[in-house]
Image (tube, rainbow, N blue to C red):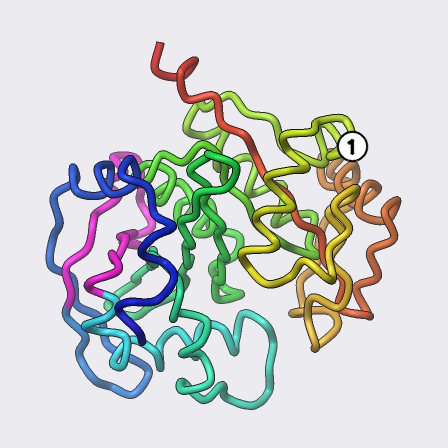
Amino acid sequence: LSDNGNQEHLVSENVRSNESSFSTEQYSLITSEGRIASFSAIPFPESEDTTGIQICTITRDELVDNLDILLPSFATVAQHAFGFEDPIAPENMVHQFDDIHSATVAIKDGVMVGYESQKQLIVEGYDTTYCSIVVLPEYQDKRVGRRLMQASLVAYQPDVISGRSQNPAAILSFRRSIQGLGIPHVLYPFDMSFQEAEIAAKVLKGLVEELGYAEDVDIATGRNTHAYGEGRLGNYQFNTENPDIQAIENHIQSVGVQRDQGDAIFFLAFLDKSEKDS
């Protein structure tokens, strides 16, 4: 893991200030190799949580110092979350963490059960978080993904938060994570299309250029062709009797996303933090 990659000049002073304003606590987990990983992280306290799952955000410096010992756990979670039969070699995941700013992890009884990686970027002048959430199947109905995303929203307070998915239930969870914190927002391209909002289209264009996906993303729709080499990524199911999920699925289908070809859709939410704070 490089400690002096492109990430450093892309992180705004606001993000650094928000991060440094939180105190950290010491955490330990048992890795999939049976080793003990100890690290400091920003806690995400929840007074109503009864699951016994700890949520904490590991900052860049701690990732640099501890990635070698944490990688096997990240790899194990990814393998089972995406339904791969063969284990993922930890060294094959190094590139996924080389340019991220932080990672929020979920720990149950000393074992990692989910994580969210975060890239903090400045795009068109907006502090923008690009997040990727991975949760073990047996914890996917326990709001773990939602809590992971809320922890990073609290820690970094971005102007825009974005993601990519094939799964309408995951996109609905993304929205409900924001709603659960009481933050007014507009979620593109579901509340409004990128064609209807020039600034949203500009941010999407800048984001996918930074991520290296520009050639495969249609800025007008957010469709990312051949995003996943595996085709359909994971054995996820979604309930089309839920009208909110069905509405998202209808939109995904309307822009031509083909899951079996590995297509996905980019989405981003502009957050109205001033209204929440007022």
Q: Position of residue 240 (x, y in %)?
A: 78, 45
Q: Residue at x 24, y 37 (%)?
A: 18
Q: Nearer the viewer, residue 52 or 230?
A: 230
48 in magenta:
yes
Left or right, 264 with respect to 108, comes to: right
Q: Secondary structure at mark 1?
A: helix
Q: Residue at x 60, y 81 (%)?
A: 84
- Residues rendered magenta in the picture: 39-62
Percent x, y of residue 21: 16, 37
Q: Is residue 231 above or below residue 20?
A: below
Q: Quadrant of residue 93?
A: bottom left
In this rendering, position of residue 272 left or right of residue 30: right
Residue beneath label 1, please?
195
Magenta span includes 222: no
Q: In front: 224, or 87?
A: 224
**Camera-side residue: 131 or 194?**
194
